[in-house]
Image (cartoon, grey):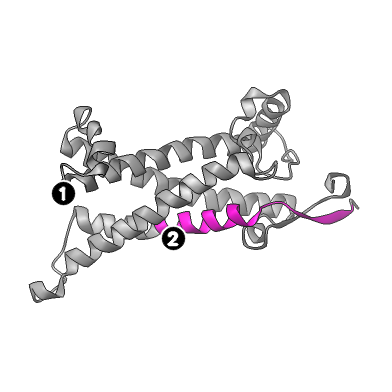
Amino acid sequence: MEKLVTKYVWEWPVRITHWVNFLSILTLSVTGIFIGSPKTLALDPSQYAMGWFRFIHFVAGYAFAVSVLSRIYWAFAGNEYAGWRTFFPYLFKEGRKNMKETFLFYTFFKPKAPHVVGHNAMAGSAYLVIFLLYLVMIITGFALYSEYAPNSFMNGAFGWLFSLFTNQGMRLTHHFVMWLLLAFAIHHVYSAWLMDVKEKNGVMSSIFGGYKSVPAEDEH
């Protein structure tokens, strides 16, 4: 039997930003759906129902933006498993090989997934797309938010997007990307659970504690 050892893989900034992103996306989705299609939840205007939903949405939006930018920074400051190379595996020979083997596993042509300590190459490529969608959500969200103050700094930073989109086009883009991210979240949980079962390396628990079980030769 292959000897396994415990290895610290996911540093605390990776784990914190992961959970902040999760909670932010959940909060933004729930409040965003209400804002986009509001229902009467208050018996009196003083209850300020829509105002509270918008306030929570904006706070979650700021938290999400800070978390995403922090994770991008950590792609250059963190360890090899958090590094930017993870998101561009096709630029490297080993990464291309891992992508091919992972694809063959996902399409049932290979019975066993290729061993990796961090993200497999296909996951890394997918996360690059997800981070681009994160940025789309952030800039469209702040552009919509900036409409309340046409002469503000935020409107100067993000208002130029209205030269590319109508207001409704911006809202539809923001809303559509939300559903893409929710669909990814479902797949993300499924694939993580699958790899945990197949590799028995503690993928699911590693996002809480940072440690994974790896073959002894990968200890260093």
What is the CA distance from the residue labelled 2 to the residue labelled 1?
A: 26 Å
Secondary structure of the residue carrying numbered label 2 = helix
> Does residue 138 lie above or below 100 as drawn?
below
**Residue 56: horizontal and vertical position, in percent?**
30, 63
Q: Which residues are magenta?
A: 3-25
**Residue 108: horizontal and vertical position, in percent?**
65, 36
Which residue position holds label 2? 23
**Residue 119: horizontal and vertical position, in percent?**
65, 42
2 vs 1, front mark: 1
**Which amino acid type corresponds to the residue marked 1 in the rendered image?**
Tyr
Left or right: residue 150 compared with residue 220: left
Q: Say which residue appears at 29% left-offset and 45% top-offset.
A: 141
**Res. 99 visible in picture:** yes
Left or right: residue 49 compared with residue 1: left
**Res. 108 visible in picture:** no
**Which amino acid type corresponds to the residue marked 2 in the rendered image?**
Leu
Of residue 170 and residue 177, the one placed in the foreground of this image is 170
Q: Are marks 2 and 1 in contact (CB under 8 Å)?
A: no
Residue 22 belongs to the span the image colors magenta = yes
Left or right: residue 171 compared with residue 182: left
Secondary structure of the residue carrying numbered label 1 = helix
Q: Earlier in the sequence, mark 2 or mark 1?
A: 2
